[in-house]
Amino acid sequence: MSVQHLATALLCLALSALRPPAHAEPVDPEQRTPIDLRRTTLVVADIDRSLAFYRDALGMVVTYDRTIITPRGASRDEAEFIRRLVLLRANDDYIGMIGLLQYIKPENPRVDLKGAAFREGTTVLVFNTDELLQSFARAREVPGVTVLDEPERVTYPSYAGEKALTVLIGAMQDPDGFTVELNQLQ
């Protein structure tokens, strides 16, 4: 496991040590902040390939799928811009969602993120799951996926100094090069 991956995993584990495995609890109303992170939108080259990863392999659920044409009311031939936006959720339809955005017209130039995992300026999407081995096996079969770290059990001291935490961790880059880490508390 790379040093950068280990550092990221330790931070994620420290933050997750205070909650039960795989299931988040709402924050106490008196501790709420005035902001929620609704969604992270990933600009992708091929939404259908991305859906094979996030929906089919990881199990996220599509909540929105629309083609957006600009100017509004224009035909596809008259359109200046055509984009497709798909929103996916895990266990909450308000926070922690992922958006997939594909520019169809004009087509955006490709940015190569392969090899840029766990570097400054890159994003790491961390998913907690009770089915890491099954999800990982499905995800690795999606065309364009790069496995970074095979699933491995790692034991860390807990954040609160209680008993150690054992976590199964695997990492990969999705078909567009976004870094994805899967965690399963043991």
Image: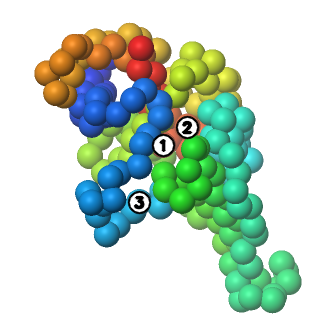
Identify which residue, 174 or 94, lies in the foreground. Answer: 94
Horizontal and vertical percent position of residue 92: 56, 50
Q: Which residue is mark 1?
A: 178
Q: Tell me the quadrant of the picture where the C terminus can be found.
A: top left
Identify which residue, 112 or 88, lies in the foreground. Answer: 88
Q: Quadrant of residue 84?
A: bottom right
Q: Amino acid at mark 1?
A: Phe
Point 52% across, 28% down: residue: 129
Q: Tell me the quadrant of the picture where the N terminus can be found.
A: top left
**In this view, 35 is above or below 98:** below
Point 76% across, 83% down: residue: 79
Give the alpha-carbon distance from disc 1 to disc 2, as whole Å: 5 Å
Q: Quadrant of residue 63?
A: bottom right
**In this view, 51 is above or below 74:** above
63 left or right of 22 in image? right
Identify the mark at residue 174; answer none if there is no mark. 2
Give the alpha-carbon distance from disc 2 to disc 3, as whole Å: 22 Å
Q: Amino acid at mark 3?
A: Leu
Q: Which residue is mark 3?
A: 37
Kindly tell me whether residue 146 is visible in this rendering.
Answer: yes
Give the alpha-carbon distance from disc 3 to disc 1, as whole Å: 19 Å
Which is nearer the N-term, disc 3 or disc 1?
Answer: 3
Horizontal and vertical percent position of residue 69: 74, 79
Point 19% across, 28% down: residue: 159
Q: Nearer the viewer, mark 3 or mark 1?
A: 3
Horizontal and vertical percent position of residue 134: 63, 18
Element type at mark 1: loop
Identify the mark at residue 144; answer none if there is no mark. none
- Residue contact between numbered discs 3 and 1, judged by CB atoms under 8 Å: no
Identify which residue, 87 or 114, lies in the foreground. Answer: 87
